[in-house]
Image: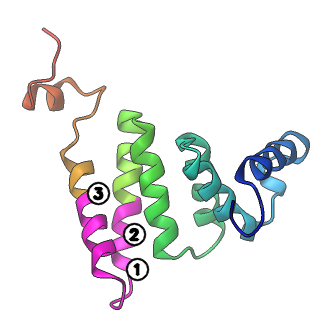
């Protein structure tokens, strides 16, 4: 429960709103919160959709780009999500304020390094490099 609102009931309201109005009619300031809601529920694809839509509409801050990177990496959709995750992590690093907590900066660098090392599922050459190719 956060601020007196049950996350489950909020998710139901968001789903109802989506079914009636669609994502494009949601106010832009609500998009990151809906994206974070889906991130908390581990619905990576929906989270990425809302966060990506938000960064297209506004000047998002580094925390939004970090969340977008996490959503894209966890989708595990290979060449469709991994480059997007790297780009989001790069934006987050470039925009991170100098007074940001060091542990968050370290975590962001760690996420980015993991994204760069992860072989693409649909790229046989990168799978062979780490011995993952089916023989």
Per the image, label 3 sits on a secondary structure element best described as helix
Q: How is the image coloured?
A: rainbow
* Relative to 125, 1 lies left or right: right
Q: Which mark is residue 91?
A: 2
Where residue 107 appears, as percent x and y from the top left, is: 29, 65
* Relative to 105, 15 lies left or right: right
Disc 1 from disc 2: Cα separation = 6 Å
Where residue 88 appears, as percent x and y from the top left, is: 41, 61
Q: Which mark is residue 95?
A: 1
Residue for point 69% across, 59% down: 1
Mark 1 touching mark 2, by CB under 8 A?
yes
Q: Camera-side residue: 64 or 80?
A: 64
Span highlighted in magenta in the image: 88-110
Per the image, label 1 sits on a secondary structure element best described as helix
| Label 3 Cα crowd, 10 Å radius (few <14 / some 14-19 / many 20+) | some
- The residue sitting at the bottom extreme is 99
Mark 2 touching mark 3, by CB under 8 A?
no
Q: Which quadrant holds residue 12?
A: top right
Residue for point 42% across, 42% down: 74
Disc 3 from disc 1: Cα separation = 16 Å
Vertical position of residue 26 compared to residue 75: above or below: below
Q: Which mark is residue 111?
A: 3
Q: Of marks 2 and 3, which one's residue comes earlier in the chain?
A: 2
């Amino acid at each position: 429960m956060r601020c007196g609102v049950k996350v489950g009931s909020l998710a139901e309201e968001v789903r109802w709103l989506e079914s009636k109005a669609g994502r494009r009619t949601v106010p832009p300031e609500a998009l990151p919160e809906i994206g974070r809601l889906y991130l908390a529920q581990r619905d990576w694809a929906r989270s990425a959709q809302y966060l990506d839509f938000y960064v297209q509409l506004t000047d998002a801050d580094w925390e939004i780009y970090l969340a977008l990177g996490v959503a894209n990496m966890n989708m595990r959709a290979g060449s469709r999500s991994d480059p997007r995750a790297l780009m989001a992590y790069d934006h987050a690093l470039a925009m991170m304020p100098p007074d940001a907590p060091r542990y968050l900066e370290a975590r962001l660098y760690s996420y980015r390094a993991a994204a760069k090392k992860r072989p693409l599922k649909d790229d046989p050459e990168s799978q062979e490099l780490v011995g993952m190719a089916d023989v």
